[in-house]
Amino acid sequence: MSDEDELVPVDHVPEGAELLKIRNLKIEATAYPPGEPPQDIVIVDGISLTLPKGRVMGLIGESGAGKSTIGLSAMSYGRGGVRLTQGEVLLNGAEIREAKPGALRRLRGKIVTYVAQSAAASFNPARKLMDQVTETTVSARGVARAEAERRAVALFTKLGLPDPETIGNRYPHQVSGGQLQRVMTAMALCPEPELVIFDEPTTALDVTTQIDVLAAIKDAIRDTGVAALYITHDLAVVAQVADDIMVLKAGKTVEVGTTDQIINNPTEQYTRDLVSVRSIDHEEKAPTADPVLRVEHVTARYSGLKRDVLSNVSVALHPGQTLAVVGESGSGKSTLARVITGLLPPSKGRVTFAGRTLSNELAGRSRDDLRELQMIYQMADVAMNPRQTVRRIIGRPLEFYFGLRGRERDARVDALLDEIELGQGFADRYPAELSGGQKQRVCIARALAADPKVIICDEVTSALDPLVADGILKLLLKLQKEEDVAFLFITHDLATVKAIADSIAVMYQGKVVRYGPKSEVLSPPFDDYTDLLLSSVPEMRLGWLEEVIEHRRMESAGH
Amino acid sequence: MHPIVKFVAQRILLGLVLLFAASIMIFAGTQILPGDVAQSILGQSATEQALANLRAELGLNDPLVTRYLDWLTAALQGDLGTALTNGQDIATSMGQRLGNTLFLAGWAALISIPLAITLGLIAVRYAGKWPDKLISAVTLTTVSIPEFLLGYIVMFYFAVQWRLFPSVSTVYDGMPLLDKLNAIALPVMVLVMVVLGHMMRMTRAAILNVMQSAYIETAELKGLRPFTIIRKHAFPNAIAPIVNVVMLNMAYLVVGVVVVEVVFVYPGMGQYLVDHVAKRDVPVVQACGLVFAAVYIGLNMLADVIAILANPRLRHPK
Amino acid sequence: MRIPPSAAIGLIITVTYFLGAIFADWLAPYSYFEVVGEVWEPSSSEFLLGTDSIGRDLLSRMIYGGRITIFVATAATILAFVTGALLGFTAAVAGGWVDQMLSRLVDLIMSIPALIFALVVLSVMPVTMPVLILVMGLIESTRVFRLSRAVASDIVVMDYVEAARLRGEGAAYVIFKEILPNSLSPLVAEAGLRFIFMVLFISTLSFLGLGVQPPLADWGGIVKENKEGIVYGIPAALYPAVAIATLAISVNLVADWILNRTSSLKGGRG
């Protein structure tokens, strides 16, 4: 094949030399809006960066900033029809943007490798891990299989995987998510590449697992001396591993600098906002004598499951206050919400609301019970019927609970839209025409329309970018003051908890392990799990990761 | 016991239960419905006495459950009863015809399955380009054409105009294999065209689905050759959906066989069934229905068993 | 909205056939049963498509045959949809034993190929048009049930349906206001595919002599009447067959377009 003859970038460049140089890169894609002619859209425009051998550069930005697209351009790869249309991508001085398929094949997976966000989906379910980890090392690097496997085992050991000698014989579904992410890192490092692209490698993991994987990746990068592009939306995470940081917004560079400069001395307003995110000040309110919602000794399990998802859970929520329920996935915190709303009847215990005992079953609850207890979901996209306008979505509870019709109802909808800081122009839009933050605001308005006493917020900011999430939290606090509504706030994110809670319940494996006013829960002495959880929240300062790893008492459950 | 044995056993058991239920339905469908078998055999002009005699002879006066159990017990022992119209033993008349039908359907499957998978792969390899569009257009046409039209077009050209093959597919015992193949060439051609369209379209969808998985992107980012990606990463995961598609399409083959046999006057099960439906010969219809259902349920069961065996999560449990 | 040329052609042909069926009385030059010429006369200015096996005008028979084919197929499709979609949605919303019972029953009916099942039933039922529509419609409703249940099950787990339930909305509101608007487009596309299948189904039955009975004839029946002519090179049997194929392809083109516009649900008749 003729495309094999082209000059390829060579390995083994001296330390400190320019490994990757991107100049004025422009990336475009073709969008196919339904019913309209296809149109070209610009995803990334005028990006330039230089990455010397052995350095780590963090690419940070919100969703849609183009950070993954830029990362993949270092392999000259356009995901889903994305095209690198202008500029230069130089790897070891050789232009690869327009390189032929044969040359790119020798580059990808050997000189530049990739670690994806979801390792669980990125491994072939039908083949053993070892085969996949050593695949390019054996086929293209000309290394003997035994040698490649020895390398892989060494990497498994370095990355802290259990049973490094035998874990390679397992299939992807036989190891946990945190472990798979490490195996994927091993797969990227095994062919001894020059550059590794880490694309949100810890985002899908629980907080306590994230720290271990992050530390493992950092050690591996340092020990192998490989260069890396580290892509994430979390500035606190990237601050722990990167030497330099590039801040991106809507496909353009906002600011580039050393990690120290970006974190401690940002020049652009956007960067300053990112650094100071979640610095909300919230005065803690004292518990009252008469809680509005009481969960008493609740035990629950899903039918067909052998063990309880909740066991003997008791918490109380006071009027006009916020109770944060914190825990990792599988801790039972969302199940608690299902019990309170009546979707999952508990096997033991009861829920009282405004002095009356709530029926265990949804069907047995009065319309007022339903009205006064509202819910907001994590994924605002699927929490609204895509075929209904904002006016109908917010208007339906007004009709349903208060019998409001026509102009009266519309006036109330407009008032609610003002309250959530969207304005009346949004009333006739469909959910698809709103941004993520706007959607969540509409969901909040729908809950408010019922004039509730309690709103259950299930991970309402988890799917949002940090700055947008900040806006939502501030809105919720404002509404709490105005409407005197209480929030049951379910989250895995301790930073959010610190920002808005009055009291906190920490859940672990279906039990409440720590519960009380915020100031007490967050002050030592800690139980082991709370200590682990608290110490796992990345802090926006350099050297934090090392301190945490040094001081941990309990291993995370994600192993 | 390895869990996979359990899954397979469960699936086979389910198939048997389904077959049993299907036998009840076939029996009920011919007995409970508001039609009098005796009346339809003898016609409107029959006397009351003649009707009563025939009902007694057919056992129509026994309770329904008794009749069903008698019928099923006999069927399980290979006794499918006798035909009303000519008094012949059904199992004997059917044996030869079933063999003929399986011979015809078998050759159609043998040709269409590899062809469909190959075309499906080509369509995926060139997804959105002209080979894909051409294949899609042709298959869209073939799935929209009734089997008998395909049959007559093929007959018109290959038998009448060009005189390449016989227009009537006569086969008999002891006929040399090559002559037999020559006789069934046209019906096989029609069946292949009928099944190919459906099978190829569904194969294409199944493979495209696999090709869009994240692990295929991983393989691309490893710089593997397209052929290696398909062989090592796509194929092992596409086996189960493709087998499923193939088996699903055997249903079209079953339907297609009935029509094609009539068109080419082929002495198989389809012709036999259609003849006796027209004559309202209920015992023959029941027997044929049972055999068709058994074959169909068996194929579906086989598809599911293969899918279970190909699933790495079941083969290598945690 | 931009309609691709293939879908436009499909739409035009489909509409033409339907108009032909509706206005058959005005369009047909002769009645469908009257013998007006010799056997199998070739096409002429008098008989545009020639005459059939006993000397009736083929064009007139085609027009009236089209009316029967389209009427039976449409009626059976509507029956299949009303039954299948209603039960499918109910199963998805109700869940539990209602869902189990309906789903297992449908599994059972689908465990026998549709044509075979129809033949078994028709062997004891009087073969009249209402019976044909009923049998075809009910057998096909199982396929519609599967699809609508699958589509509705995907929607039922959405948070907006849960939100409606938590609000206290009844099952009717959930089905008609939340599920139906969101499942309409795959169902419309499916209706097209089901209609094609009905056309092929009734044609096949009539071709086998077990569908529409003489002297009435649908397109499948006309093929049967004239099939002997093929061997003598007389194309009378091919016209109705081509009519069936073009109608099916046209509806398919339209359905394909709707399907591509909305989702990647797979069609087919299984």
Image (spheres, coloured by chain):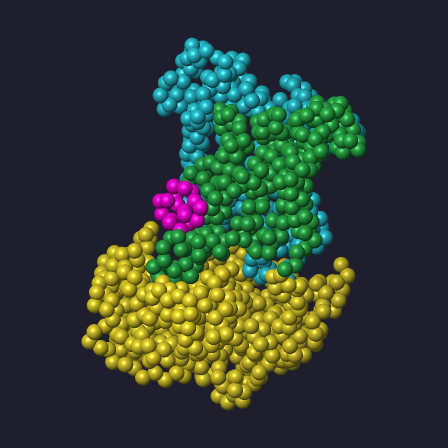
Chain colours: A yellow, B cyan, C green
Q: Quadrant of the N terminus of chain B?
A: top left
Residue C93 lies within the magenta run = yes
Q: Is residue C178 visible?
A: yes
In the foreground, A393 or B54: A393
> Quick one: which residue is furthest to the left in this view?
A289
Q: Relative to B158, does residue A165 appear above or below in the rendering? A: below
Q: Relative to A429, does residue C157 appear above or below in the rendering? A: above
In the foreground, C115 or A12: C115
Principal secondary structure, stretch drawn in magenta: helix
Specify whether A184 is left or right of A417.
Answer: right
| Residue drawn at x 50%, y 31% as measured from the top left | C131
Q: Which residues are magenta?
A: C86-103
Image quadrant assignment for residue A58: bottom right
| Residue drawn at x 66%, y 63% as measured from the top left | A37
| Residue drawn at x 62%, y 25% as measured from the top left | C215
Q: Relative to C141, does residue B212 appear above or below in the rendering? A: below
- On the image, the x and y values in percent for residue C37 come to 75, 24
Specify whether B242 is left or right of A365.
Answer: right
Specify whether B39 is left or right of B185.
Answer: left
Image quadrant assignment for residue A102: bottom right
> Quick one: which residue is furthest to the front in this view?
C26
- On the image, the x and y values in percent for residue C64 come to 64, 34
In the foreground, C94 or C1: C1
- On the image, the x and y values in percent for residue C145 come to 47, 44
Residue B176 lies within the magenta run = no
Image quadrant assignment for residue C22: top right
